Image (cartoon, rainbow, N blue to C red):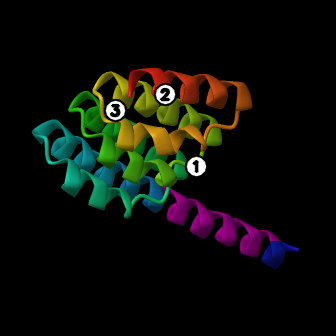
């Protein structure tokens, strides 16, 4: 019985250390991403995302980088990063944002193909109508 408890305890300690190590590694990588993001090195920040093991942390940083590209009117980079998001609802939100901004910027070739990627058929109809009128 003692051997079983010792084995279980050892397994718990080993597992806990590996989880803790991954968390520390992700924290270090996240700090690097934050530095590059703050310095405006978005491409380098994107590359660092591949090293993150926590999918939620990866999605948060990916969304932040998408938001920065969006604020810089770099819609092509926003579209390029959308597949890296793992939440379909967030993808739909960013897709809608790009459709609106592309239309207002008269970059219809960027926004129009995205309309068919919207899940809501009523929104698709509305946006196709808007693009016919304004583009």
Check disc 3 and report its element: helix, strand or loop: helix
Looking at the rendered image, the disc whose residue lies closer to the viewer, 3 or 2, is 2
| 19 lies above or below 61 | below
> Relative to 94, is 50 on the left or the right?
left
| 114 lies above or below 43 | above
Q: Quadrant of the N terminus?
A: bottom right
Check disc 2 and report its element: helix, strand or loop: helix
What residue is pinned by disc 1?
86
Counting from the top left corner in percent of width and height, residue 109 is at: 37, 43
Q: How far apart, in angstroms, are the residues tagged by discs 3 and 1?
A: 16 Å
Indicate whether residue 54 is drawn in magenta: no
> Which span is picked out in magenta?
5-20
Please rate how many residues cluster around mark 3, counting C-alpha atoms within 10 Å: few if below 14, some from 14 to 19, many from 20: some
- Cβ atoms at labels 1 and 2 below 8 Å apart: no
| Front-lying residue, 103 or 73 | 103
Report the predominant secondary structure element of the magenta stretch. helix
Please report whichever mark, 3 or 1, sits nearer to the chain's N-terminal start.
3
> Relative to 81, is 116 on the left or the right?
right
> Relative to 109, is 6 on the left or the right?
right
| Front-lying residue, 118 or 4 | 118
Judged from this view, the residue extending furthest toward the bottom is 3
Q: How far apart, in angstroms, are the residues tagged by discs 3 and 2?
A: 27 Å
What residue is pinned by disc 3?
67
Quarter residue 104 falls in = top left
Check disc 1 and report its element: helix, strand or loop: loop
> Relative to 80, is 48 on the left or the right?
left
């Amino acid at each position: 019985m003692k051997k079983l408890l010792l084995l279980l305890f050892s397994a718990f300690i080993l597992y806990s250390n590996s989880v803790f190590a991954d968390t520390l590694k992700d924290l270090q990588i996240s700090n690097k991403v934050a530095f590059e993001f703050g310095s405006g090195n978005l491409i380098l920040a994107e590359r660092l995302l591949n090293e993150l093991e926590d999918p939620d942390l990866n999605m948060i940083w990916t969304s932040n980088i998408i938001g920065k590209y969006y604020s810089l009117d770099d819609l092509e980079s926003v579209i390029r990063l959308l597949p890296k998001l793992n939440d379909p609802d967030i993808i739909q939100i960013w897709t809608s944002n790009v459709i609106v901004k592309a239309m207002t910027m008269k970059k219809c070739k960027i926004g129009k193909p995205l309309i068919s990627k919207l899940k809501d058929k009523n929104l698709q109809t509305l946006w196709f109508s808007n693009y016919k009128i304004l583009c």
